[in-house]
Image (tube, rainbow, N blue to C red):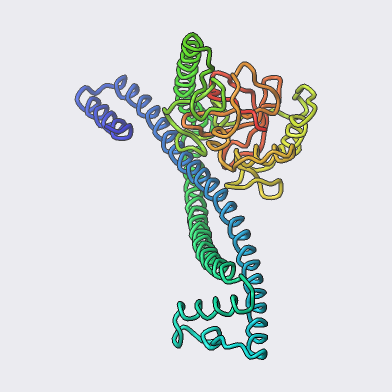
Amino acid sequence: MSSRRTIRTLFAAAALLTALVGGPQVVKADGVGTAQQNVKQVAAELQNLLDQLGQLDEDYGKAQDKKSKVDAEVAVSKKSVADMQQRLKGEQNILSDMAVTNFTSGGSTALSPLFSDAATYSAAEQRDALGRLALDSGQGRIDDYQSLVINLAKEQKFLQQKQKEAADLLTYLQAKQQSYTSLETAYKAKLAKAQADLGAAQVQAAQDAYMATLAAKAAKVARARAAADAAAAAQAAQAGGTTYTAPGRGGGTAAGGHVMGGNNGGGNTGNGGGSSSGVKIPPSTVHIPAVSGRAGAVVAAAISVLGTPYHFAQASPGSGFDCSGLTMWAWAHAGVSLSHSAQVQYDTTAHVPVSAAQPGDLLFFYSPIGHVGLYVGNGLMIHSPYTGTVVQYRPVDWGMVVGVGRPG
């Protein structure tokens, strides 16, 4: 039975009990219980919308990365086609000169197949004439010419495929953008109504409690997985002295399992580990350690965009940031390229234990990975939580962190 169906059943049972038993006290208790259930249901519905928004953001980010790669492949292929066409033109000019020379010198080679279309002479006839011309002229260009023609045809076909793939990805991205805009409008309307009907503080508290529960479950799975990895490493060391590395984790032990997802991952919203409100800490009250080197450049970049609005699938101060867009943009200031996806960032960075986190490291939340923030030291992180919030500091709830990634 789904959670929503369970809630409706509880409502019906409570109403029936009130009708049968009666009495002011029963009605009062039922009213309180129903109100609490209403708040929980509203929180769950709001959370479901945020989950969908997060999944759209993650899907968009992955498709955006893929399109960037395809666009790069298209550019390379276009240049390759142009280069081969230029080379082919040069070869044709050389062969034409050879043909004229052979003709004016009284050579006996038949030239017609070289300058006729396929409807008049077959490819075999043209190749034969070209070969005889090349041999008569003392040249061995026929194989190079034919190879160039074949390779050009292959490259042109590849280019057409990549151009279609790029066009399809653009259509997909446009559809995701439209879906996000519609869903975001629905979320904001529902949130405003819930706050008006139930009170903003009550709705916020319910959302916080809901997400804290989900994050705690994910963290529990992460700790169990880390313990299993440590046991496997110890067993491997005893067996042959080799170091065990969990598949796809870059050599660390802090990793997530598969319980529930989050913003940019498909489950609970990316809130940075425990509170959907994303605790806003005035920058003037923050004290973080001085950091040098690449990590210093990354932290400084993140600090420079505090207060920038969250924005779907964006990664720039002018347009806004989603969670992975912020970390991608910040690390670019240290010359490190990251994907615009929290999950892919997790998959492609070296992992270190949570206890070893340093400023500049990426902190991941939920399982599958649903949110990423940038650790800046002194127990604080900078992140871009979700729609309606801004890039902000927040204390790190280390019990909710399911992985720490170190780029570069």
Image side of residue 333 versus residue 383, left or right? right
Q: Is residue 9 above or below residue 156?
A: above
Q: Position of residue 395 (x, y in %)?
A: 64, 23
**In the picture, residue 86 is in which quadrant?**
bottom right
Question: Furthest residue to the left?
Answer: 20
Image side of residue 289 versus residue 160, left or right? right
Q: Is residue 237 above or below residue 181?
A: above
Residue at figure coordinates x 52%, y 54% from the top left? 177
Q: Position of residue 273 (x, y in %)?
A: 55, 26
Number of callouts: 0
Front residue (pair 48, 207): 48
Q: Quadrant of the N terminus?
A: top left
Q: Position of residue 186 (x, y in %)?
A: 47, 48
Residue at figure coordinates x 66%, y 37% from the top left? 391
Front residue (pair 88, 330): 88
Residue at figure coordinates x 59%, y 57% from the top left? 71
Question: Furthest residue to the top?
Answer: 238
**In the picture, residue 221 is in which quadrant?**
top left
Image side of residue 259 versus residue 301, left or right? left
Q: Is residue 8 above or below residue 96?
A: above
Image side of residue 201 versus residue 30, left or right? right
Q: Position of residue 343 (x, y in %)?
A: 53, 36
Residue at figure coordinates x 44%, y 22% from the top left? 217
Front residue (pair 193, 30): 193
Q: Is residue 408 above or below residue 158?
A: above
**In the picture, residue 374 is in which quadrant?**
top right
Q: Quadrant of the C terminus?
A: top right
